[in-house]
Image: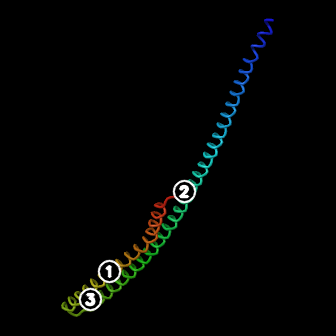
Amino acid sequence: MSTKKSTATATPVDAAVTAGKETFEQMTKIGQDAAQKNMEQAMSMAKDNVEKASQTLFKGYEQVNTLAQGNYEAVSKSFGILSKGFEDLSKAWMTYTQGTVDSSMAFGKQVLGAKSLNEVVDLQNTFTKSAFDSFVAESTKLSEMSVKTASEAIEPLKARVDETVETLSRPLAA
């Protein structure tokens, strides 16, 4: 009889333990499901954020690459303008130098053909004034050519600086 009594007493305890165990399992299952759902949401958000950051990074890289290519082209264009300007200046200087040599030769012939010292002095005064006027005119011309060349050569660079500042001052579009 004592065995039946303990079996009868164990049944409500077993029922309570079973009910507690089921409750615990349900709570654990609910907790696991919630944790799994939260983990999936966190992973999805992390993936989205990484994709957005990658896209922004690649856009930034493409933008910098495009700017660098444009800068290279502007510098090349500027050097081309400078080269052409220096060529023109050299030609103008050589033309002036040739003209100066020619006028000096002509002056020398005139001096050798002079009949008096007064005539030599007059020739010298005329030649000196003419040479000085020619030098001032040619210097002005060469100076204007230099300024024009420098202004033209700086334009592509100035345009690139303006574009780069404008581009970099804008935020990247996501």
Q: In this view, does 6 lie to the left or right of 36?
A: right
Classify the position of the C terminus by image quarter.
bottom right
Classify the position of the N terminus by image quarter.
top right
Task: Please tell me whether mark 3 or mark 2 is closer to you in this view.
Answer: 2
Give the CA distance from mark 1 to mark 3.
30 Å
Tell me the residue that label 1 is attached to: 140
Residue at x 19%, y 90% (from the top left corner):
117
Give the residue type at disc 1.
Answer: Thr
**Element carrying mark 1:** helix
Give the residue type at disc 3.
Answer: Val
Q: Is residue 1 above or below residue 168?
A: above
Q: Determine which quarter of the picture holds residue 8.
A: top right
User: Of residues 113 and 168, which is closer to you in this image?
Assistant: 168
Q: In this view, does 51 lie above or below 18?
A: below
> On residue 111, which mark appears?
3
Task: Please tell me whether mark 1 or mark 3 is closer to you in this view.
Answer: 1
Q: Determine which quarter of the picture holds residue 118.
A: bottom left
Give the CA distance from mark 1 to mark 2.
48 Å
Q: In this view, does 108 lie to the left or right of 19?
A: left
Q: Give percent across and percent down for residue 38.
A: 63, 40
Q: Determine which quarter of the picture holds residue 157.
A: bottom left
Q: Give percent across and percent down for residue 166.
A: 46, 64
Q: Give percent across and percent down for residue 44.
A: 64, 46
Give the residue type at disc 2.
Answer: Gly
> On residue 25, which mark appears?
none
**Element carrying mark 3:** helix
Mark 2 closeness class: few <14, some 14–19, many ≥20 residues within 10 Å:
some
Tell me the residue that label 2 is attached to: 60
Q: Which colour scheme is used?
A: rainbow
Mark 1 closeness class: few <14, some 14–19, many ≥20 residues within 10 Å:
few
User: Of residues 43 and 144, which is closer to you in this image?
Assistant: 43
**Element carrying mark 2:** helix
